[in-house]
Image (cartoon, rainbow, N blue to C red):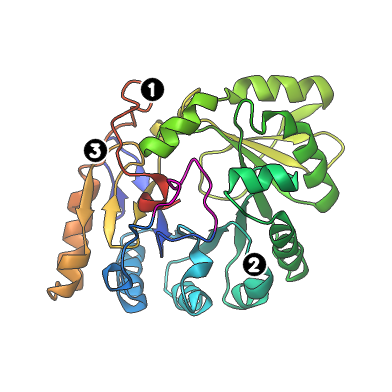
């Protein structure tokens, strides 16, 4: 039987975090100087991850996105991708990355049957990028992007969190960059995830206004893209560029939510903006059977809330984004 939550939504998509660590320090994601990461012993092993995803697949999940933190800091990540891609029922295996290490791993990920990439890129200006990421080097990201394109990845989606007074003025430059290189572009609104997210939310940009601004320069027509995410797309007429808008605050998409998040420590989060969760790691290490695990997961889905409350209760979520999984 498929996983259907109390509101009739079929759960077919798992966002799988393999680490809470990252080689960048974007200010809206990780607190400056934060070092209280999970220890590797607290992470699910590859065997445990494969087992949980196998059970999810048997319950009707077909889309898996590997995330972090930064997933490529997890040792032997392509090996895990290969194992997950071979599970019956998994038809879409994608990965989110900051691309800092993508030059090194692009070809191996392609050979491991990762089908799509999402790359976080919040500025095309090296100094601004360094400020946003607390020391990151833009040229490494660009090298990673070009290596991914050379390896045959398509589509490659560029994810940009737009923030007033920080990078909101780069929207048109990002459009031109993605047209030039054949990438897809997705703009994302800030979310009040922990203190870091609430600080970034002071720079909140309503993406409806960005869409209106772009429409003054480009002819925007309806567009679609493959994938299980919440972006609403338009296409720039006369080009192949699709622009997606992910709007959890100005125009939330909770009524179509089809996903849950599995954190690196085995916590199953049922909603990004709520605290409902199921702890799977202790059960796995106590010897739970696959049938019992199915019952636990199904019971967890029955707890999935109707929607987040980012607007109504912006201080509700204490954990920050890296702890939850991208």
Residue 102's disc is: 2
Q: Earlier in the sequence, mark 3 or mark 2?
A: 3
Instruction: Identify residue for label 3.
Output: 6
Q: Nearer the viewer, mark 3 or mark 2?
A: 2
Secondary element under disc 1, as helix, strand or loop, is loop
- Label 1 or label 3, whichever lies nearer to me, is 1
Contact, CB < 8 Å: mark 3 with mark 2? no
Is residue 27 found inside the magenta-colored segment of the image?
yes
**Where, by quadrant of the figure, is residue 211 drawn?**
top right
Between the residue at mark 1 and the residue at mark 3, the CA separation in whole angstroms equals: 23 Å
Looking at the image, residue 127 sits to the left or right of residue 68; the answer is right
- Tally of numbered discs: 3
Q: Residue at x 78, y 32 (%)?
A: 172
What's the magenta region?
A: 24-34
Residue 311 tag number: 1
For label 3, count other residues whose C-alpha is less than 10 Å away and answer few (under 14), some (14-19) or many (20+): few
Magenta segment main secondary structure: loop
**Where is the N terminus found, in terms of image quarters?**
bottom left
Pointer 1 local density, CA inside 10 Å: few below 14, some 14–19, many at least 20:
few
């Amino acid at each position: 039987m498929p996983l259907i939550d109390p509101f009739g939504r079929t759960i077919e998509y798992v966002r799988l975090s393999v680490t809470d660590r990252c080689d960048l320090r974007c200010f809206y994601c990780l607190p400056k100087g934060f070092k209280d990461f999970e220890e590797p012993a607290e992470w699910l092993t590859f065997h445990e991850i494969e087992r949980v995803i196998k059970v999810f697949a048997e319950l009707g999940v077909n889309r898996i996105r590997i995330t972090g933190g930064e997933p490529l800091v997890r040792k032997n990540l392509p090996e895990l991708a290969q194992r997950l891609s071979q599970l019956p029922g998994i038809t879409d295996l994608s990965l989110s990355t900051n691309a800092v290490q993508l030059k090194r791993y692009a070809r191996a990920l392609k050979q491991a049957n990762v089908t799509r990439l999402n790359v976080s890129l919040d500025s095309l200006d090296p100094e601004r990028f360094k400020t946003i990421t607390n020391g990151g080097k833009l040229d490494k990201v660009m090298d990673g992007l070009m290596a991914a394109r050379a390896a045959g990845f398509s589509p490659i989606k560029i994810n940009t969190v737009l923030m007033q007074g920080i990078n909101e003025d780069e929207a048109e430059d990002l459009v031109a960059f993605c047209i030039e290189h054949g990438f897809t572009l997705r703009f994302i609104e800030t979310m009040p995830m922990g203190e870091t997210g609430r600080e970034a939310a002071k720079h909140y940009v309503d993406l409806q206004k960005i869409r209106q601004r772009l429409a003054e320069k480009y002819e925007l027509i309806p567009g679609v893209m493959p994938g299980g995410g919440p972006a609403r797309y338009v296409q720039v007429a006369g080009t192949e560029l699709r622009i997606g808008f992910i709007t959890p605050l100005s125009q939330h998409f909770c009524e179509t939510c089809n996903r849950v998040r599995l954190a690196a420590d085995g916590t199953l989060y049922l909603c990004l903006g709520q605290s409902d969760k199921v702890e799977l790691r202790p059960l796995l290490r106590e010897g739970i059977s696959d049938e019992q695990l199915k019952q636990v997961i199904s019971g967890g889905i029955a707890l999935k809330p109707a929607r987040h409350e980012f607007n109504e209760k912006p201080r509700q979520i204490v954990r920050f984004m890296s702890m939850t999984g991208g």
